[in-house]
Amino acid sequence: MKILLVEDSATLRHAMSSYIRAFGHDPLIASSGEEALQIVDKTPVDMIIMDVEMPGLDGFETTRLIREWLGDHWIPIIFVTGKSEDEDLEHGINAGGDDYLIKPVSQVILKAKIQAMERITNMRDQLNQLNQDLKNLSQIDGLTQLYNRRTFEEKAHEYWRLATRSKEPLAILLLDIDHFKLFNDYYGHPAGDECIKLVSSALQKCLNRPSDLVARYGGEEFIVMLPNTPQDGAYHVAEHIRKTVEKLNLKHRASTSSDRVTVSIGGSVVNFTTGSSLQQQISLADKALYESKQCGRNRSTVKLYNPHNTVLVVDDDEISIDIISETLRGHSTVVSTRSGEECLNMAKELKPDVIILDVYLPGVNGYAVCQSLRDDPSTAMIPVILISVCDKEELTRFGKKVKANACLQKPLEHHRLIAKVNQFIT
């Protein structure tokens, strides 16, 4: 073991380090609390023998800092002191010490203390390993060694939150072994288990990124989550998986769709997670899987949950346009203009899904623009969200007058804006 000896007395340092070497351990030497902290920061140690009475940082304060730095990682700390009063011992234990040595230090007692702490360390390590094994058993599917459904759902929600913050697309694939019940009935359950293991192994080999998440979702069903993956990328991965399983050439004489084991795959992709939910995306992937099965099986179907829509932003304030564009990044394609007249032309040409229109514009104001949009049959049905710094009641009153679909006060709230846009495009 690497044992850090913290002692300001050169005589004691020499003697105790010699003892530690004689016991078969590797001593690291510090002459002060400050030096001890530097060693712990840079070098892993297995045990610390700490003098209590030192100039500068004493042993108690040094121990408190070490415990704070190490967090949940525990290493035994033995205090060395000339004091043997009960309150001194209590003070040391409260500071984070695990045992005491009273000066002058006996070589025999020092060896016994080190051996005792080593046994405790080994028992803690074994307990930690058992706890980790139990955790793995609760997270891992025993047959395939993939994550189980419960663990997938826990981790998938973390991925979902990350996608919401980063505004990146998120893909989910559901895979089902075609006619697996017939396979089990024909070849027997042991062969069925072997089939599931081979398919899961092939599936894992198709996923190259550490961030890709895969789990056994049901009996013969698997689920994959692909962060930052658009629709074409998700379809490419799905087809790679499907073809890889097909190339296993596992015979399936009971199948009504192929002479070998195949999989059907359904996928869903969300460009922007705000306004939807993980369960909705999984449900859409399940519908896509059903479509793959209805179309003959051994195929991939990947659907886009919220395809990019076009939002026309009309505002003479460039900062406001930038804020709205950033809010809708990944959610919609944003085009903008600072002119009411140009808005009318762009609305006719682009046919945007939503128009976000500021009331106060140079030339033709937002109310007049909205009225013109409603009077023109080619733009009358485009949803318009009026935005303004004006009083809420005034904004609502004029919004109703010009038949705007919604009104929002500036400064715009991120989630409120997205919710309003989603109201008209989903």
Image: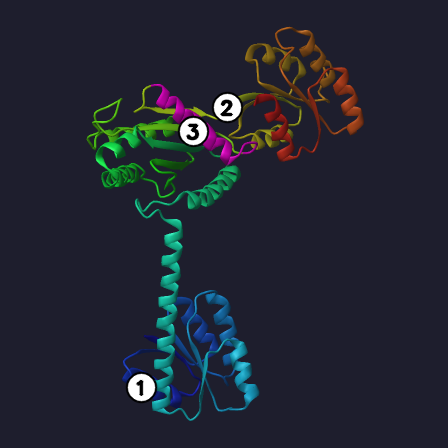
Q: CA distance from mark 3 to mark 2?
A: 22 Å
Instruction: Give the magenta part as a residue range.
Output: 274-295
Looking at the rendered image, the disc whose residue lies closer to the viewer, 1 or 3, is 3
* Disc 2: which residue: 308
Residue 143 in sight here = yes
In the rendering, which numbered label is found on residue 286?
3
Which residue is found at the position 48% from the left and 26% from the top? 305
Q: Residues within 10 Å of mark 1 (few under 14, many from 20)?
A: some
| Colour approach in the figure | rainbow
Q: Amino acid at mark 3?
A: Asp
Pick the quarter of the image with the N terminus. bottom left
Instruction: Name the element at disc 3.
Output: helix
Task: Indicate the quadrant where residue 246 lies.
Answer: top left
Q: Indicate the position of residue 251 as horizontal and vertical percent values.
A: 19, 30
Is 280 contained in the magenta span? yes
As drawn, is 234 to the left or to the right of 319?
left
- Please tell me which residue is depicted at 43% across the width and 35% down the height of the picture: 228
Of tags 1 and 2, which is closer to the observer?
2
Which secondary structure lies at badge 1? helix
The amino acid marked with disc number 2 is His
Towards the viewer: 105 or 333: 105
Prevailing secondary structure class for the magenta stretch in the rendered image: helix
**Mark 3 Cα within 10 Å, few/some/many (few <14, many 20+)?**
many
Q: Can you identify the residue that label 1 sits on?
A: 18
Q: Residue at x 37, y 71 (%)?
A: 123
